[in-house]
Amino acid sequence: MRTISVLDLEDATVAIAAMRAALVAAGKTAAIAVADGHGDLIALERLDGTPASSVTIAANKAWTAATQHKATGAIGARLRKTDEAFDIAYYGDRRACGWAGGLPVRDRDGTVVGSVAVSGLPEREDEEIAEAGRAALEARLR
């Protein structure tokens, strides 16, 4: 029998708190999200002053990172450097996102169990804030 790790609301709360703290420390605002291994949202928070459009983008980044098992920035970079963008058509799902800021989360065995995502800042900053959430969550899972 195989045991499958899953993220729960308590796990998501740890990641959200870490990302929120990083945003507050930087004096920034954004939408932050945590998804399960299927890309379905567990938690999403929109800090005051964040545009509404960032909510959908954060959710899409979380979905993409979880379902593709890759950082969204890496996916986008690959598509921008090749002719694959037309062939892949963003994986045929309107939620697919190639902007940086979505990161997969792995358990102690290296299995992707979910993702974290940030939207509302320049891509590099989105990814840095998301990394704070992933680091907190992966530390908890080890």
Image (cartoon, rainbow, N blue to C red):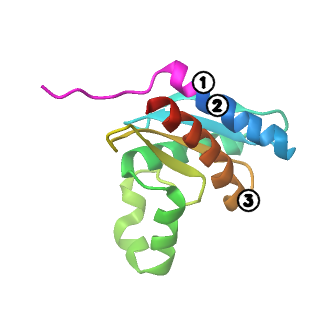
In the picture shown, does residue 99 fall above or below 115?
A: below
Which mark is first along the chain, 3 or 2?
A: 2
Q: Is residue 95 magenta?
A: no
Give how far across and how far down residue 64 sits, in percent: 45, 49
The amino acid sitting under disc 1 is: Thr
Dots 3 and 1: beta carbons under 8 Å?
no
Front-most of residues 3 and 91: 3
SS class, disc 1: helix
Tag nearer the camera, 2 or 3: 2
Front-most of residues 52 and 73: 73
Mark 2 Cα within 10 Å, few/some/many (few <14, many 20+)?
Answer: many
Residue at the spot of label 2: 16
Q: Which mark is residue 122?
A: 3
Residue at the spot of label 1: 13
Q: What are the residue bounds of the magenta stretch?
A: 1-12
Give how far across and how far down residue 66 sits, in percent: 42, 44
From mark 2 to mark 3, how far is it between C-alphas?
Answer: 19 Å
Left or right, residue 85 beside residue 137:
left
Dots 2 and 1: beta carbons under 8 Å?
yes
From mark 3 to mark 1, how far is it between C-alphas?
Answer: 24 Å
Left or right, residue 20 beside residue 68:
right
The amino acid sitting under disc 3 is: Pro
Left or right, residue 83 beside residue 46:
left
The amino acid sitting under disc 2 is: Ile
